[in-house]
Amino acid sequence: MNLAEAGRLLADECARYTALGWMRGTSGNLSVRLSSSPLRLAVTASGLDKGELTPSDVVEVDASGTPVHPGPPAPSAEAGLHGRIAAVSGAGAVVHVHVLAPVLAAERWPSGVELRDLEMLKGFGRAAHDDLVTIPVVPNSQDMEVLGDAFEASYRADTPALIVARHGLYVWGSDLRQARHRTECLEWLMRFIIES
Amino acid sequence: MNLAEAGRLLADECARYTALGWMRGTSGNLSVRLSSSPLRLAVTASGLDKGELTPSDVVEVDASGTPVHPGPPAPSAEAGLHGRIAAVSGAGAVVHVHVLAPVLAAERWPSGVELRDLEMLKGFGRAAHDDLVTIPVVPNSQDMEVLGDAFEASYRADTPALIVARHGLYVWGSDLRQARHRTECLEWLMRFIIES
Amino acid sequence: MNLAEAGRLLADECARYTALGWMRGTSGNLSVRLSSSPLRLAVTASGLDKGELTPSDVVEVDASGTPVHPGPPAPSAEAGLHGRIAAVSGAGAVVHVHVLAPVLAAERWPSGVELRDLEMLKGFGRAAHDDLVTIPVVPNSQDMEVLGDAFEASYRADTPALIVARHGLYVWGSDLRQARHRTECLEWLMRFIIES
Amino acid sequence: MNLAEAGRLLADECARYTALGWMRGTSGNLSVRLSSSPLRLAVTASGLDKGELTPSDVVEVDASGTPVHPGPPAPSAEAGLHGRIAAVSGAGAVVHVHVLAPVLAAERWPSGVELRDLEMLKGFGRAAHDDLVTIPVVPNSQDMEVLGDAFEASYRADTPALIVARHGLYVWGSDLRQARHRTECLEWLMRFIIES
């Protein structure tokens, strides 16, 4: 995938999440893998209204989140965590949205949010029965190294999500569509457990 | 009705439910009766984004949910339950959506959700007064035989709905529009009783 | 206003309320005054999907809700209450929607829902301070005479709304727009008091 | 910025807030700075449906909210508070919406709503860590002098928002977009604390 194509996909996805109310203000950011050797991601630019993103509002970054080409626009401040997640998990796309339900769930279960015996877990990539799923919760930080280390310490290959406490949700998948489907299912699951 | 016409109707209905947030991820599936002797249904294909469904993303199945013609696309894994519901109830259309309120209600009332003396029951096909309506709740299963047997054991001809615990809602009617109206009314009723 | 013009306005308004989720299934109905001597209303037809209403899906009725001209479509079953409200209050338009918050409020305060010292009361036609507003609650009935008598017994000229318990909300105003603005403000107020 | 340009921007912004459900009835009003010496604002006209606002439905007012040119349309009754906020804070745009969550939060914390250690505070213009943010709450009034004095008494240069109890939310920023982003982030924060 080239950067122009990635830009179109990322802008379309951002418009969807904005319509769901999951990218309020300029919050949230998305990335998609451009190449693997070396690892290159296209990540949404920093500080923009995600409902108005255009295909050129994306930046090519390396595994550390550093722009490959100098100059504006700047990548999201969280590009480093996107890079870390992509490198560790092998994901083709990473979604970060400030959706409320997972943040509320993390307040109640700060050492990890447990889910089990729920059909929607299938849409998240797990089994609907007899399969305890724990969504890791890590403390918020402005330091992407710190966040990345916390992610890696909590990482399990079968659990493509991470809640950053008092901040938001990360979900990843093979491509933007799978990552979106998993995000939608996980949001449903989080809403279910906080309203149950 | 032929398969092409069914495909257009099913795609339109899926877009409506998706906009309501009731088909998150790739969840949910719809079917409509094509013929009665033998029983044939058009059911939505498996694993697709229901907001992007096209008229060709449907499959003709028999009463057991088995495709009549080989080859892709595959029908929804729940096609067998659609067939069973259509055969037992005589319904012309079956709706299955992962809408939150009925699943929350089933957590609270796992042996059946009782409704009575509510105007919205008319839109569900029952009386607004002095008519106790019990929406059956059955345990979730991945085996459509098990789910179908549980459906049939709980079936009453005057109650066109079933909640699958920790999963979602089935509603049926003479056609897709009636099934949708009943689904919308039942969702309202479930939201009412869990917020009362 | 003639019936054709009324039909266009009613269809437009129904589409708005449907988009808000306040006319689920085929629930709710709207009317607008066509003439005063004798009293004639245009009321939405019975049993239709309000999100798909066309300008011809309306019926001219008299003060009792009886169609002035024979034949289909049939008026809403609640046309009689629209006629009674229009006659008693002098309203130019009556809105009836199955919006959840007022029905929940009526469960909690079955003898009337009290509101006071809230800015949104201005949009409902009352004062924002030192003005106790009581929204009447009447029991549900399928008999429009019974409902109409209950409405009239509870009627106060300064309070253009009525909650029918376990059913829905009536609001009226000089025209459809004023009735809609009052409905929107009252829904906000009801949501406020049940969440406070 | 001239009045015509301001009118286009204000109508666009009103349509957004209306779609979010934050300007129900004819509630809410927006303003944008036209000039600084002397201070002149374009403010939305009084009593209109904000989802139908046109670019000409705006009024040029001075720092006291008084129209600079006579005649219709009349400015929002709250134009005086917009002027006061713009003068004191230096803001380029002021948003006033009747969004529910801040009003609910003010009921619970009537002497000010405290926020701390939440990522969304960055989108509001503050730090995500170790920075106690108190959103002032002032009693409602119909007298813009009284409201303006209460605003000024509670004003801190680093906190671009004010909750008017039992009424709604004011947020300001350098332009309409920044004010909107801050409003969206603050609504998320208020929803978070009342649901936590």
Image (tube, coloured by chain):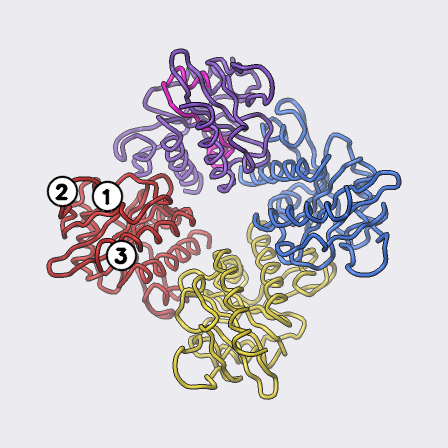
Chain colours: A yellow, B blue, C purple, D red
Which is more toward the observer, B111 or C191? C191
> What is the CA distance from the residue labelled 2 to the residue labelled 1?
14 Å
Q: Secondary structure at mark 1?
A: loop
Q: In the rendered view, would you say D163 is above or below C126?
A: below
Q: Secondary structure at mark 2?
A: loop
Question: Is residue D41 rendered to the left or right of residue C2?
Answer: left
Q: Amino acid at mark 1?
A: Ser
In the picture of the structure, the residue carrying the numbered disc 3 is D5
Question: What segment carries the magenta color?
Answer: C83-107
- First in sequence, mark 2 or 3: give its number: 3
Could you tell me which chain the residue with mark 1 belongs to?
D
* Residue found 41% across the figure and 21% down from its top: C33
On the image, the x and y values in percent for residue D152 come to 18, 54
Q: Which residue is mark 1?
A: D76
The residues tagged by marks 3 and 1 sit, at their Cα atoms, a distance apart of: 19 Å
Q: Which residue is mark 2?
A: D70
How far apart are the two marked residues, 2 and 3, measured between alpha carbons? 20 Å
Horizontal placement of C186 versus D165: left or right? right
On what subunit does the disc labeled 2 rest?
D
Q: Is residue C143 above or below residue A194?
A: above
Q: Position of residue B91 (x, y in %)?
A: 77, 37
